[in-house]
Image (tube, rainbow, N blue to C red):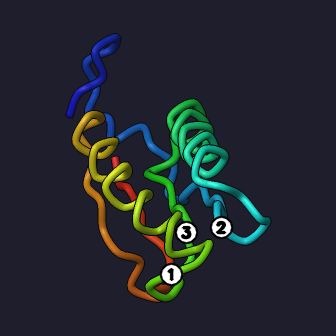
Amino acid sequence: MNCPKCDFAVSSVLRDDLYITDIAHAGEDWHLARDKIDTALDQALLNRHKGFKIIHGHGNDSGHSAIIRINAVPYLKALAKRHGGRLVQDRFNPGAHIIYF
């Protein structure tokens, strides 16, 4: 993907690190968690990170972190598609996903 302003390949101007945000371990509800995802996306793009990692919790089939996980994964898929990115499960943490730009 090329930058619409300078026409350089976006991957050539990105930092090598991820922006990381935890959205499920400080008592967040889904609305606050979604706001944290949006803020992480903005910060990752603004600071030219290669992507961002959202720690949404593994959770079980019910309870607080399950609600966030159930809502976060489809939301992250939509964001990845909208921004030309790719969503992957974090291979080291089943309670996290990464969007690479």
Looking at the rendered structure, the secondary structure element under dot 1 is loop
What's the mark number on residue 4?
Answer: none
Taking the image as shown, residue 80 lies to the left or right of residue 25, namely left
Pointer 2: what residue? 24
Looking at the rendered structure, the secondary structure element under dot 2 is loop
Q: Residue at x 28, y 15 (%)?
A: 4
- Disc 2 to disc 1: CB gap under 8 Å: no
Taking the image as shown, residue 32 lies to the left or right of residue 2, namely right
The amino acid sitting under disc 1 is Ser
Nearer mark to the viewer, of 2 and 1: 1
- The image position of residue 82, as x and y in percent, is 26, 34
Q: Quadrant of residue 19?
A: bottom right
Nearer to me, 69 or 67: 67
Q: Residue at x 41, y 77 (%)?
A: 90
Pointer 1: what residue? 62
Looking at the rendered structure, the secondary structure element under dot 3 is loop
Within 10 Å of disc 3 (Cα), the crowding (few <14, some 14-19, many 20+) is: many
Within 10 Å of disc 2 (Cα), the crowding (few <14, some 14-19, many 20+) is: many
Q: Residue at x 28, y 44 (%)?
A: 78
Dot 2 or dot 1, earlier in sequence: 2
**Distance CA(mark 2)–CA(mark 3):** 5 Å
Look at the picture and state if 15 lies above or below 94: above
Nearer to me, 70 or 13: 70
The amino acid sitting under disc 2 is Ala
